[in-house]
Image (cartoon, rainbow, N blue to C red):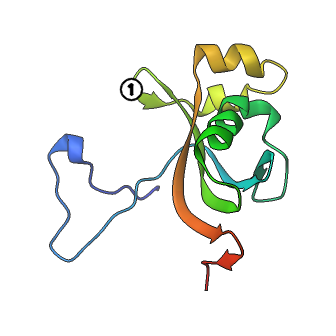
Amino acid sequence: MVATGPKADRGHELPPGHAAEAKFDGFRTALIVQEGRVELRSRRGADLGAACREIRQAAHDKLPAGNGLDGELVVWEEGRLAFERLQARGARAAASAREGPAHFAAFDLLHQGEKDLTA
C-alpha cells in the first residue's frame, strides 16, 4: 500500500500544526551556475544538461554565477506532471522542449558564491 497525503483539490486540509511538501514526479537535480556555463547533475552525477537545454539557458540568463541549487526537473502536460515526457528526452531534446518544456522546481539554495549554505 502506498501512503497518500491530503490533497487540496479534494477539499482536504492538513490538521493544525502540520505541514506537507509536494512530491514532484521528475528527476532530482543539482543546478550549478558557474562563470560561462550551467550544469545539471542527477543525484548520481549524470549530466542532464543536454536533455534540458532550455533550463540551462534560462539559468544562464537569469541566475548569477556562483549559485548552486537543489531541485527537481519536471515536465507539465495538460495540467499534470508527465514523467514519461521527461524520460523520453535525450536525442530528441530540442523537439521535446518545443512539445513540452522542462521546468526546474528549486527546493534549496546550496551555495552562493563561495558561501556554503548547507551548514
- For the point 53% across and 54% down, the residue is 106
Disc 1 packing (10 Å; few <14; some 14–19; many ≥20)? few
Q: Which residue is mark 1?
A: 79
Please tell me which residue lies in front, 87 or 65.
65
- For the point 50% across and 47% down, the residue is 24
Q: Is residue 66 above or below residue 97?
A: below
Q: Quadrant of residue 87?
A: top right
Q: Report the quarter where the C terminus lies.
A: bottom right
Please tell me which residue lies in front, 113 or 93.
113
Q: Is residue 11 above or below residue 14?
A: above
- For the point 71% across and 62% down, the residue is 66
**Residue 12 place in picture, x, y as percent:** 17, 52
**Tag 1, which secondary structure?**
loop
**Residue 6 place in picture, x, y as percent:** 27, 55
Q: Quadrant of residue 86?
A: top right
Q: Quadrant of residue 53?
A: top right
Three-letter code, disc 1: Gly
